[in-house]
Image (tube, rainbow, N blue to C red):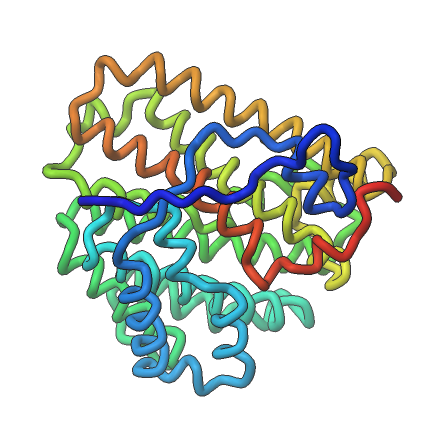
Amino acid sequence: MSTTHEEIPLRVPDRTPVLTLRDLIDSHLLMPFPFLRNPHESEAAAGVDAWLSMRGLTDEPGVAAMIARTRPAELASYNSPSMDSGLLQIMANQIAYQFVFDDRAEDVGRRSPGRLLPMLGESIAILRDGRPPTAPLGAALADLYRQVRERCTPAQAARWAEKSLEYVHGLLYEAVAQAHPFLLRTGDCTSIRSLTAGVEPFYPLCEAAQPHELSPAELHHPVVRRLSRLSADAAVWIPDLYSVVKEERAGEMINLALAYQREHRCTLQDAVLLAIQEINGTIEEVQRLYAEIEPSLSPAGIGYVEGMIGWIRGCYHWSRTVPRYADVASVPAVP
C-alpha cells in the first residue's frame, strides 16, 4: 500500500528564538521517525462521523465539537500509514470512542469516583462476559468489539478485549487520584497514565494488519514485550507535553510534565524539559532494542513492531497541530 509523505517543520532553527512552549518542545524532543499519513484518511474521517451519529454519541452535548477538535481519523492515519481501509476505520472509530469515553469518565469521576462504577461496570460486562449493553456508550463499545471480532482472529480479539479492560480499570485509578491528589507520586502518575493512555488495545489491530498471526515465541519475546511497553509510554507522554497547558488549566493531575512540576516544584517550562529527557531516553531505547531484535523477527513480527512504533511517530505529528492542544502555543517558552 502506498503512503503519502509530507514535509512539515519540526525544529526551530538555531538562529531563531524559541518563542512559545510548543516551540520549546519542538526544538528539544527527539523524533527520528518520518511523517507519514494513510491515503484512506478522509474516508476514515467520514466513517467516524457516520458511526458516531449512528450510535447516537454525537447527540450528546459537546461531542461533535470535541471530535472536530480531536480529529481521530487523522491520528489513526498518522499512526498507521500503511494499514488497509477496513482496519484503519476500526482504529479511527476506536480512537473516537475512547475520546468520548475518556472525557465522560473525567467529567463523572471528578465529582466522585464512585459515580463511575455503573459506566465502567457495563464496559467490563461487555468485554469480559459478552453481556448486552444498556446505554449508548455501551452499545458503541459492543459494536466496536463486533467489528474487531469480524476482522481479527479469535486470539487477536481476545488480546484486544484484555487490553481494553486494562484501560477501563485505569480510568477508575485516575478518578481516585484526581479526588486525592495529595497522595499522588510521580511513579503513581506514570503507572496510571500507562493504563489510561489506551494505546495498547490498538496493538492487536497492528498484528491483524500482518499476513498472519505472530508466533507465541515472537509475541511474548521479552524484547518485543519491552518494546510494547516503551512505545505505549512514549506515544502517550508526547501528547502530555502538548496538552500540558490545557490540562493544567483544567486541574488535571495525570500528566507526565505536571508530575515533574509537582515533584521538583519548578516552572512548567522546566518540567516540560525534564519530561522530554525521559521521553527522548525512551525513544532511544526503542531504537536500540528494535535494531537488536529485527534480524530475528519474521516479516509479520517486523510489521507488528513497526506498527507499535508508529504510534510514537503518529502521536507526535498529531499532537503538534491538533486543535485540542492549541493552548500550548499561548504560553511563552521562558517563564
Q: Nearer the viewer, residue 107 or 165?
A: 107
Q: Where 85 sits versus 201, above or below?
A: below
| Quadrant location, the C terminus | top right
Q: Position of residue 230 (x, y in %)?
A: 47, 30
Is residue 128 shown left or right of residue 185?
left
Q: Nearer the viewer, residue 35 or 166?
A: 35
Write the residue at 33% across / 25% down.
224
Q: Where 96 sits versus 242, above or below?
A: below
Is residue 256 shown left or right of residue 79?
right
Q: Position of residue 128 (x, y in %)?
A: 30, 58
Q: Quadrant of residue 184?
A: top right
Outermost residue, left side: 212
Q: Nearer the viewer, residue 175 or 102?
A: 102
| Quadrant location, the N terminus | top left
Q: Position of residue 41 (x, y in %)?
A: 32, 59
Instruction: Inspect this view and state whether residue 185 appears.
Output: no
Write the residue at 66% across / 36% down.
12
Write the residue at 57% across / 42% down.
238
Q: Position of residue 120 (x, y in %)?
A: 46, 66
Is residue 307 shown left or right of residue 149?
right
Number of numbered discs on residues: 0
Outermost residue, front side: 15
Write the residue at 22% across / 14% down.
296
Instruction: Inspect this view and state whether residue 83 appears.
Output: yes
Q: Where 258 sits versus 298, above or below?
A: below
